[in-house]
Amino acid sequence: MTFEKTYEIHDNGQIIIKLPDMFRKKKKVRVIIEDIEEDNKSKLDLLRKASKDPLFLSDIEDVKDDFLYSDKEAL
């Protein structure tokens, strides 16, 4: 089972994790701490850059082509 949630860090450097019911009877759980970049400007810059990247655009076209007929089957 996997549970993922973003937590705020308190002023004292601690976080409080309230376990969901599915984990309450477990003896061990794995906790991974990952830094979350909250800089939306850098994400938007990367999206703008990707929108001009020939390889990315080619991949988008390939995916579009893959779903061309399956999309029509749903109609």
Image: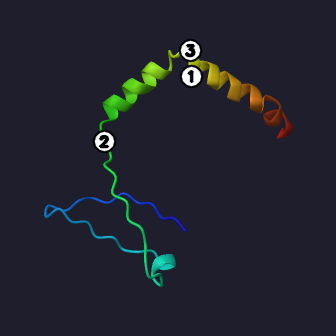
Q: Which of marks 3 and 2 is in front?
A: 3
Q: Are marks 3 and 1 in contact (CB under 8 Å)?
A: yes
> Residue at horizontal 17%, vertical 62%?
13
Q: What element carries label 1?
A: helix
> Residue at horizontal 63%, vertical 24%?
59
The residue where tag 3 is placed is 54
The residue where tag 2 is placed is 38
| For residue 30, above or below residue 41 | below
Of mark 1 and mark 2, the one earlier in the sequence is: 2
Of mark 3 and mark 2, the one earlier in the sequence is: 2
Q: In which quarter of the image is the C terminus?
A: top right
Side of 54 where 70 appears, left or right: right
| For residue 70, above or below residue 18 | above
Q: Is mark 3 on a helix, strand or loop?
A: helix
Tell me the amino acid under the disc marked 1.
Phe
Q: In which quarter of the image is the N terminus?
A: bottom right
Picture quadrant where residue 57 is located:
top right
The percent coordinates of residue 35 (x first, y second) are 31, 49
On residue 56, the disc is 1
Tell me the amino acid under the disc marked 2.
Glu
